[in-house]
Image: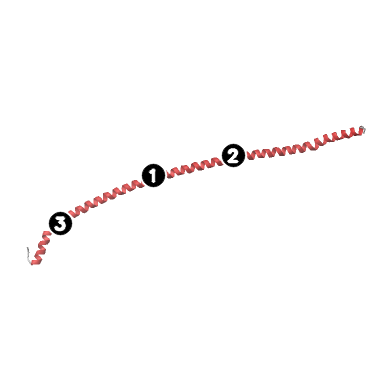
Amino acid sequence: MDIDVTILCQLGLFLLTLVVVTNILLKPVMHVIEARVQRIEGAEREATRFEKLASESRDAYLTRIHEARALARREREALRTAGNDVKRDLLVEVRAEIAKTLHDTRERVGVSELEVHQSLFTETDALARRLVSRLIGREV
């Protein structure tokens, strides 16, 4: 087997074709593939960033909701306590007013009873005389 000039020419043509094909076809295809890989990686980084932002926003939202509920619970308890205080004060006032009214009424009843007792005491003698007068038929 002899190495002659045709093999060298074929080898040269192959290398020339390889260089041309690499520069014309392979490099542009590689650039397109690299650009696509860069876009995919950029999109993945962007998606990761958005997921992180969404998680932070959700955590902040849940924290604010928890704080708002705690504040509402404290305010509700404060209002309930204030309402109970007002209720207690009103009950004390009403009970005092009832006690005063009852005391006044008892005093009036006592005074009226005393007046009636005195009135009856003074009229008993006159009524007894009239009754005796009617029974016996003459003035006593």
Outermost front residue: 1
At x 15%, y 56%, the residue is: 119
The residue to which callout 2 is attached is 53
Please state if 46 lies on the left or on the right of 28 as rendered: left
Q: Secondary structure at mark 1?
A: helix
Q: Which residue is mark 1?
A: 82
Quadrant position of the N terminus in the picture: top right
Q: Amino acid at mark 2?
A: Leu
Q: Quadrant of residue 125?
A: bottom left
Q: Are marks 1 and 2 in contact (CB under 8 Å)?
A: no
Q: Give the SS element for disc 2.
A: helix
Mark 1 residue type: Ala
Please state if 79 lies on the left or on the right of 106 as rendered: right
* 3D distance between C-alphas at marks 3 and 1: 54 Å
Of 34 and 100, nearer the camera is: 34
- Residue 61 picture quarter: top right
Q: Of the residues tagged 3 and 1, which is closer to the observer?
A: 1
Residue 73 spot, x, y in % from top left? 45, 44
Q: Position of residue 62 (x, y in %)?
A: 53, 42
**How are the residues colored?**
secondary structure
The residue that disc 3 covers is: 119
Answer with mark 3 or mark 2, whichever residue precedes in sequence: 2
The disc, 3 or 1, on the residue closer to the chain's N-terminal end is: 1
Image quarter hosting the C terminus: bottom left
Q: First in sequence, mark 1 or 2: give its number.
A: 2
Q: Nearer the viewer, mark 3 or mark 2?
A: 2
